[in-house]
Amino acid sequence: MNVLILSIFWGIVMMFSGIALKKKGIATGLAIAGVLILLLGNLGDMSTVVITTSTFNDMLAFRGYNVLFISIVLVATLMYFLVSGREIENVGTGGFDYYALIFFVLTGIVIASSFNNLLMLFLGIEIISIPLYILTGSDKKNLKSNEASLKYFLMGSFSTGIMLLGIAFIYGDSGSLAIVPAPSPFGFSFTSLPTLSAVGALLLMFSLAFKVSAAPFHFWTPDVYDGAPTVFTSFMATIVKAGTFIAFFRMFAGGFASVQGSWGLAMQVIIFLTLLIGNLTAVFQQSAKRMMSYSSIAQAGFMLLAIYAHNDMAKEGFLVYTAAYVLATIGVFALLSRVADPGFQGFNGLAKKEPLLAATTTICLLSLAGIPLTGGFLGKYYMLVATAKAGGPFWLVIFAVICAAISIYYYFRLIIAMYFKEGNPEMAPVSRGLKFWLVVLCVLILALGIFPYEVLLNNLLSL
Amino acid sequence: MLALLLILIPVATGLATFFLKQGNAAKLFSLLSSLATLGISIGAAICTDKSAKSFQAPFLTNLGSSFSLSLDGMGTILVLLTGISLVLVFISTYKNTYKDPSRYYALMLLSQAGLMGVFLATDGLLFYFFWELALIPVYFLCSGWGGERRIAVTFKFFIYTFIGSLLMLVGLIYLYVLNPGQSFSLTSLYAMKLSPDQQSVLFWLFFVAFAIKMPIWPLHTWQPDTYEQSPTSVTMILSGVMVKMGLLGVIRWVLPIFPYAVHEYGHVVIGLSVVGMIYASLVAMKQDDLKRMIAYSSIAHIGLMCAAVFSVSELGLQGVLVQLFNHGVNIIGLWIVVDAIEQKLGTRKMSELGGLAITAPSLAILLVIMSLANVALPLTNAFIGEFLMFNGLYQFSAWYMAVAGLSIILGAVYTLRMVQKVIYGDTNSLTKTMTDLSLNQKLILAGITVLIILYGVNPQPLFKMTMDTVHTVAQHI
């Protein structure tokens, strides 16, 4: 609850302090302070030092798992501000308004990760989405940015409509908005839902799949990610994605897990298509930025495995995967937003010019590709074990592994360009602070891969 | 503790080398590091104290894994090989200059650490970790310091091996899920009772990974290109030590765990290996590039080793274990000669060479010795291994043995043809400028010659060292 209240509060603070404070750099400082306060609040949530114990009549629940998840999101946001604060300020005038929007997105994520009620789910997803439409179009004079924003808005509203329809079906059928399906009046438990609820659940799944850009609902992703200013692409591909994923996870791996008979097959199809389309299309991209947007689709395919498996392994693994994916993607985008030419050739010879930046980006890419010792490997490993343990289909595991092998191709293209090709890339100057924080980021990724319990998961067990 | 040091020294020194500013300092530092590692590995080979040879620490405990290392006979002989190889490589290329030396030497040391880990790990997940980690530095070495086509070629190599290792990962995961103890430890995996169906699937998941690494025909296509395009020093590591990862994988992680599948599919694997031997020998005869010729000859040798492993006879296995070491040393010797020729003349084409016996007599003598060891002449170290392996294969089936035996003849043909073209005949305008080996190369090759003859005449120490592995495998198969 703390984080929910504080994030709204801090969003408003950011909004109005833009009027009084004009100096450069203050906005970022204020935002970082805000995230630190949120983290403190999060700590309070963990140890029951809370502003209020109200949970809106149990419509929200702040328990171990989602509180830990929120702290992952907050740490990622902190890293994001530290690494790309300057870029955020450069997009508009001062950046206060954008920071305010980002804090509102965090509010949405808190709701989406702790809802107990379908209305709250809807509210959370909407609060996440609306600021994003604005952030996408924040490069006001750029036609591509405007186009992306409008496209995102139209398609996003459409999917919201579908979600609402799904919720209405479920409500109409069961008369309840709880995320746990209504118990049978005859006392036995279902493994699948009655027709109307099942249709509702599927509609809900499709609209959530749209939000996390899972195939075949992914078509907006490359255009929006490409059109939006690169800093905000980074935000959308990481923190926002994690935030919507936890809603998906909570809905289907939590509440509706018992009725997998109704949605399991559809989920298998979505996972298959997401892995296939994400990975194959990423192979053919010529721009690193577009490659990263397809990579985010491909990674979503792996994260969906956690929802499909929804056992203990999957729950732990989902945290590890999200943390590793979010951190690594922030690291890659930190470089992307500083290079003038987003095509692969724009990175040629970067290792000579900026050896440290090339090294950190390489570690992030290796993590995304799932090489051992990185958090990315452990995340993928967890997903595969969880699916195998849940008795998931053998072909899906093999297929996921083949896709992971394909992903090597496009991640390594960037590494090859940086290290083994000659060139003199044009890029914005890199400050010492950025380098430092990128090293910290890489240490976090490696620590997550070697000591996942010490870094992250033990907190879950002790809660 | 010794086991841990074998990994720790190269990791620590490797990471430190990244930060050395001076190229020469990096060179000297890494040579010293490799000498220290060699010292430890010799110590481990002599040491009889069991507890010193293993190490255990908690690592990803909740996932059923642990950081457990242990040295058995096969591990010892491969650790020795790894230790010696790096020393051989560093000394023999001491006069070469590499661009960006601190990074080069750091990556070399890190690859050594990865290899040591693969040979020592007795936990499935840990084994997988090191398996992948050994690959990364080698990938960067080949792509960064290799020949003209290096980027495409090493990328192919990387993807090939990565697909293989991911299949192995799936295999490991299924083993873990099937294991009632929910553990990756080698002893618990050895104790598992798997149904024939499970064994068949898991066998192929593992075997493909190892077959790519060895490589076994028809999964060998990455190998000649990679050997050719890599800097010769890296090729030495690749062909001398890295291919042994695949053989170790089969002997330690396949034979004892999937005995049924090994019997069931032994014919297929041996068939592929034998076909590969003949195929590679024939292709080797047609090569003009020295590196490619040795690469194909290596495929033939590894094919024999793989066939002998799957013949599941104690004799054959004994031969393989000895050959793991001898093949590594011999092929490194050959590469050193090739490197000397290439560094001085700038070519590896046999058609452009000739008459080196006149201008570089000691090079010629040493090349002949290495070549004779390569064709496994009696009294050289390779003979005893090959003899035992053919023996094992004969017990399995005389037909396979007969066909595989052809590769001995073919091997002699292409090796002697190479010797004739390179060192005999008249000098041409290019080879006239050839100078003899430098002192460090002579020293190293002389050392290898001593090993060749010593273990050719008296292979007993190697047999003794690897006895326990043979017994362990024989118990489970």
Image (cartoon, rainbow, N blue to C red):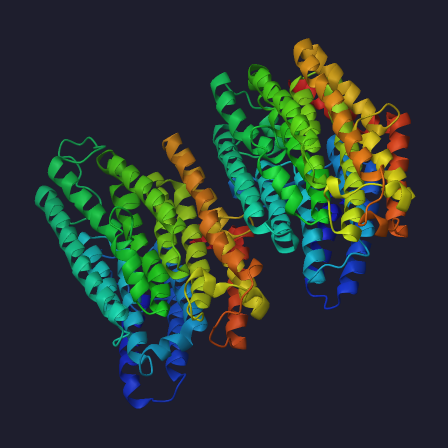
State the residue in front, B442 or A69: B442
Residue at 36% in and 75% down: A88
State which quarter of the image contains the N terminus of chain A. Answer: bottom left
Spot occupied by residue B163 in the image (x, y as percentages of width and height) = 51, 39
Is residue A61 in sight in this rendering? no
Numbered disc total: 0
> Residue B225, position in %: x, y?
61, 41
Residue B326 position (above or below residue B445): above
* Relative depth, front residue between B416 and A257: B416
Q: Where residue A401 sits in the image (x, y, percent)?
A: 44, 39
**To which quarter of the image does residue B380 belong?**
top right
> Does residue A108 appear to the left or right of A45 in the view shown?
left
Let me know if residue B229 appears in the view: yes
Q: Is residue B18 left or right of residue A13?
A: right
User: In the drawing, does residue A254 fall left or right of residue B399?
Assistant: left
Q: Residue at x 36, y 79 (%)?
A: A89
Above or below, A247 relative to A262: below
Q: Where is residue B367, by image quadrant?
A: top right
**Image quadrant where residue A21 sits:** bottom left
Task: Identify the residue at image location x=19%, y=65%.
Answer: A150
